[in-house]
Image: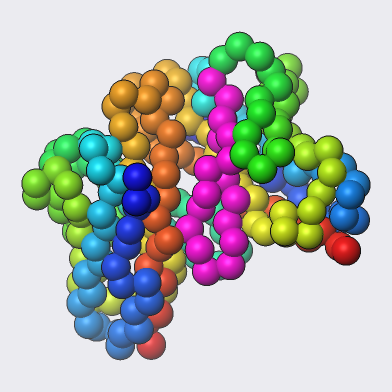
């Protein structure tokens, strides 16, 4: 296992710009999750995929946010018209349906700074 | 709804002493419970989980956690702390009866500092 990878690790953008992050899960993990973590807080759930289907979305996921997992492998998270409040660490995690507890393994995160 | 409370923002302990990081939870049904550790500018690393059975769960790096259903607690422990254990620790819960809801709910984290 090479672990969950995320790209880029850091992103600085100006308010109003669009950004896209990528997550590559552990191979053969069919579940993929996105979380957001702000300073001093624990991660908060954004959305979850099983294979290519997006099964759950949090209220935190406003209309400016969209996530895809077109082939059931890697996933992208796009934020349109970024706002300063979007500044956070975006974490991706993956798990396998063969695990009864759905233990989630996290990537290193993408730190977004909106100026 | 499910929730997690980590009542201590900061825990300091001397190297070689035992450590405890506290966690209490609330779920509608029975819980799956997890501990993760986060080093600066890194993602979360899985430490251990409680599924069912033995209330004392052993995990990575000598950590263990004790599940107490009556107190709805899942405290993280280690008999002898190392300076390298200094990090941010998160407790998380998922309700087994949550159906398709797979997301974890995390506490706000506890910063552990082990003093040499």
Query: In the image shown, does A67 or B15 lie closer to the viewer?
Result: B15
User: Taking A110 as reference, is A16 left or right?
Assistant: left
Colour scheme employed for the rendering of this structure: rainbow
Residue drawn at the location 72% of the way across and 59% of the way down: B84
Residue drawn at the location 38% of the way across and 87% of the way down: A115
- Find the magenta span and give its range: B34-51
B20 above or below B108?
Answer: above
Whether the magenta-drawn stretch holds residue B36 is answered as yes
Residue A6: x, y in percent? 32, 62
Residue drawn at the location 35% of the way across and 84% of the way down: A12
A86 above or below B30?
Answer: below
Magenta: main secondary structure equals: strand
Q: Quadrant of residue A62?
A: bottom left
Residue A38: x, y in percent? 50, 65
The residue at the far front in this view is A1
Residue A52: x, y in percent? 13, 41
User: Taking A83 as reference, is B18 left or right?
Assistant: right
Q: Quadrant of residue B27?
A: top right
Residue drawn at the location 25% of the way across and 66% of the way down: A21
Residue B52 visible to an observer of this rendering: yes
């Amino acid at each position: 296992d090479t672990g969950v990878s995320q790209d880029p690790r850091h992103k600085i953008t100006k308010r109003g710009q669009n950004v896209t992050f990528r997550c590559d899960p552990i191979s053969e993990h069919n579940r993929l999750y996105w979380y957001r973590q702000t300073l001093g807080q624990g991660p908060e759930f954004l959305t979850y995929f099983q294979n290519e289907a997006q099964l759950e979305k949090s209220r935190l996921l406003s209309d400016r946010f969209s996530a895809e997992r077109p082939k059931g492998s890697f996933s992208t998270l796009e934020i349109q018209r970024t706002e300063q409040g979007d500044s956070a660490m975006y974490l991706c995690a993956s798990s396998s349906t063969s695990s009864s507890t759905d233990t989630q393994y996290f990537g290193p995160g993408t730190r977004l700074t909106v100026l | 709804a499910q929730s997690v409370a980590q009542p201590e923002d900061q825990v300091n302990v001397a190297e070689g002493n035992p450590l405890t990081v506290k966690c209490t939870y609330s779920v509608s049904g029975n819980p799956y419970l997890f501990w993760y550790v986060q080093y600066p500018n890194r993602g979360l690393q899985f430490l251990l989980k409680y599924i069912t059975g033995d209330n004392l769960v052993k995990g990575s790096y000598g950590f263990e956690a004790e599940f107490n259903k009556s107190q709805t607690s899942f405290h993280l422990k280690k008999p002898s702390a190392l300076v390298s254990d200094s990090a941010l620790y998160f407790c998380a819960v998922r309700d087994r009866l949550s159906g398709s809801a797979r997301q974890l709910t995390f506490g706000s984290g506890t910063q552990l500092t082990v003093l040499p």
